[in-house]
Image (tube, helix red, strand yellow):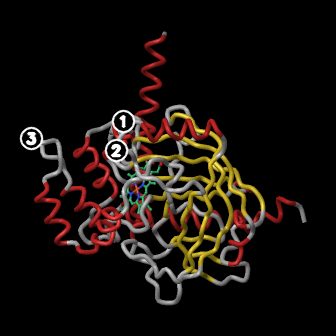
Amino acid sequence: MSRADICVPCRLAAIAAVIGCTAAAFAWTAGWLTPKRVDAPHIVNTFESNYGIHAGYRRNHAKGLCVEGEFESNGNGARVSRAAVFAPGETPVIGRFAIPGSNPSTPDASIPVRSMALLFQLKDGEQWRTGMNSAPVFVVRTPNQFYQQLVASKPDPQTGKPDPAKLDAFFGANPETLPFRQWIKAHPPSSSFANTAFWGINAFLATDADGNAHAVRWEMVPQTPYEAESADQKLNPDFLADDLGSRLAQGPLRWHLVLTVAALGDPTNDATQQWPASREQIDAGTLVLRQATPQRSGACRDVNYDPTVLPDGLKPSDDPLLAARSAAYAVSFNRRTHEEAALAHAHGEAQQ
Ligand code: HEM
């Protein structure tokens, strides 16, 4: 059997998985899965009306930079997933570090959360894309709550800041937000992308070589010890990018990819809840990041880190945030890439 023959079933499975996810995302975009029809364009429009349009930038996590490296799998992840990325060996990775928010010039110290997004380029053209945040839980459980929170966060034109009374009313009406708010209060922001742990938060379904399904979540655990953001750093609006550049000039940075395996009954549809600490953890290998580039010119610029793009051996769970993320990221991606093209065109005409 040739290599191409071997790959036909896995290609078909990958295509089926992508079509399945796309269908779910499309249904959500069209508002079919939500009684109040809060759809993806609505959510992205609300980002824009709250924080303005920053042409060519992501509508959320706008400030960031591209990174590149590889994932060194030790083979342990194969216990739960037959995905080729978990077989022993190396997979090239295109990544992006960022902070949440729609403004690409926002000072780093104004945001307590950091993010890491990764695209694993598997052999045979399969991809695994994931977007992770620096907290183990998400603030809301449903896309509708995400939208309501955006509405409640709209900056007051007088102060330029959200109205605390509206935010308090939202949090009061949505007690699911408590674990996230408590976690953020108890964990001061980190001094560096390099010493931050990143969680995939949403649950996924892994399928092993025998066809058994396992609900999993994943985390990137840094080799660099955590330190809190310092008073000096707060004076530099871009300290996270500056810090990363100087650390990478000294050598590569590493994280362990840790899979947490659910026990029967652990919820897979609630990103506001952590699973008990006693759950099995599998150290699946090491992410090695070697270089950073500005996002305007880097390889991550035109990547949509849609978390439902998964290789054979990983599938979305029933978490309602996943289809909503996929649909919203597509709207954001389409708008920003159209703007990029228009900007490039205008720049070309100006030079003629
Ligand atoms: C309904 C829930 C959510 C909505 C509507 C939403 C919306 C968005 C949008 C519009 C973007 C910009 C995408 C682009 O243009 O490429 C984005 C980026 C991002 N989101 Fe979400 N998000 C949601 C939930 C989450 C959750 C649960 C996580 C963490 C697990 C997360 C992590 C990220 C990350 C890491 C990025 C940046 C990706 C990059 O660096 O390109 N989001 N989000």
Q: Are marks 2 and 1 in contact (CB under 8 Å)?
A: yes
Q: Marks 2 and 1, Cα distance to the nearest angstrom?
A: 7 Å
Residue type, numbered disc 1: Pro
Q: Which residue is mark 3?
A: 158
Label 2 sits on residue:
109
- Separation of marks 1 and 3 at Cα, in angstroms: 24 Å
Residue at left offset 70%, top offset 63%: 85
How many marks can you see? 3
Q: Is mark 1 within 8 Å of ligand 1?
A: no
Residue 165 at x, y = what percent? 10, 59
| Quadrant hosting residue 74 | bottom right
Q: Which of the numbered marks, if any, corresponds to residue 262?
A: none
User: Quick one: label 3, few (<14), some, or many (20+) residues within 10 Å?
Assistant: few
**Which numbered disc flags the more N-terminal residue, 1 or 3?**
3
Amino acid type at image mark 2 = Ala
Vertical arrangement, residue 352 with respect to residue 307, above or below: above
Amino acid type assigned to the residue bearing label 3 in the image: Gln
For label 2, the SS is helix
**Quarter of the image where ligand 1 sits:** bottom left
Residue 60 relative to residue 265: left or right:
left
